[in-house]
Amino acid sequence: MSRTSTPVIDPVELTRDLIRIPSVTPADEGAMDVLERHLTALGFTCRRLAFEGPGGEGVHARIENLYARRGTASPNLCFAGHTDVVPTGPSDQWSSQPFAGDVRDGVLYGRGAVDMKGGIAAWVAAVSQVLAEGEPAGSLSFLITGDEEGPALHGTKRVVEALAAEGEIIDACVVGEPSSSQQLGDMIKVGRRGSLNTWITVHGKQGHVAYPERAANPAPVIARLMARLNDHVLDEGYENFPPSNLEITTIDIGNPATNIIPARATARLNIRFNPSHTGDTLIDWLNREAGAMQAETGLQITLEHLCSGEAFLTEPGAFVEAVQDAVEAVAGRRPEASTTGGTSDARFIRALCPVVELGLVGQTMHQIDERVPTAELETLTAVYRRVIETVFERL
């Protein structure tokens, strides 16, 4: 490859520039503009995809998304990430202002340093290094959203749908989530469990506690139902996955009086499930259990469900091995292929292509004083560069 005049980007400075933009989900505040400017300078064709609709708590949201591609040859290696961040919490508890991007003693502080503006900056820097050496043997693309930390209704999910409808081909994707556990490169994520939220309401009849025959108490009914669901063993695990787990996240009655039988009781649960199940099969099971309890007690029970993602697994093969080999070559350790943790936008991208997650150490994400050593950003940039080169050699 012949060298080009492509600008080489500093991952630390780009991370600082992104941190200084307070893009608390779902606000963009210009984060996409910063990325678009850098990617355009690197020769990418950038498309802004903005989608609108109900967001968290029913609030109307407008979400900024970006799809950028350089080249037309196959394979198309995509990097996916998000510029939105979680709220900072009390800013006076930070040792630096959360959006200042301060560097002290070789450590960069700021909301999004780890999750995941640092990962985005490292991949952009790695791409700039690759392009400075010449044209790669394939296409490079970016899929960046501003709706990962929120409901994720108008971000990657809708971009993936739009790209699929257009026939856009992505052959493999790296998501820059902070997948490393203790040391950079000790873990990649090759799958995730699915997630199902369910809201349950038991409808009773309010009355005086001294006259229970005139009322219908929903409290013991919801207690029995939740105990029955909680005691059920969903499975014993699945290959490469831990057992599925159901967690009761709240039980609410909201009755301030001591002498009133309440009119209704509500509860919410979340199920993190492996490929032994689908969202639909779990919904069917929950509905059957609620129906049986309703038949036993005579009280109406209603359920609402939201499956935010199905379980998936990227099988071992050329892509996963290329990523592992690249990490090992640079970081000196072979990453474990894991399916642990919560959900990520990989659950949407897997509809297009094989996907893995590879990024910084996630110890401080979502915490006060979120931070990353600048040397780790430099190393991740080198890892990403080797990933790009290795994937193009093998796919």
Image (tube, rainbow, N blue to C red):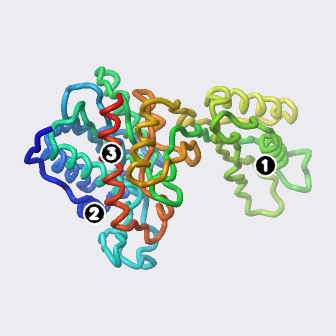
Query: Label 2: which residue?
Result: 12
- Residue 55's image quarter? top left
- Of discs 3 and 1, which sits in the foreground? 3
Q: Which dot, 1 or 2, sits closer to the camera?
A: 2
Separation of residues labelled 3 and 1 (CA atoms)? 66 Å
Which of pointers 2 and 3 indicates the residue nearer the eye? Answer: 3
Dot 2 alpha-carbon crowd within 10 angstroms: few under 14, some 14 to 19, many 20 or more: many
Q: CA distance from mark 2 to mark 3?
A: 19 Å
Residue ID at (70%, 43%): 245
Name which of mark 1 and mark 2 comes first in the sequence.
2
Which residue sits at x=22%, y=59%? Answer: 10
Mark 3 vs 1, N-terminal side: 1
Q: Where's residue 253, x and y in %?
A: 72, 54
Query: Disc number at residue 392?
Result: none
Image mark for residue 386: 3
Q: Nearer the viewer, residue 204 or 326?
A: 326
Amino acid type for the residue under numbered disc 2: Val
Residue 108 place in picture, x, y as percent: 34, 69
Q: Going 80% across and 36% down the picture, which residue do you hit?
A: 299
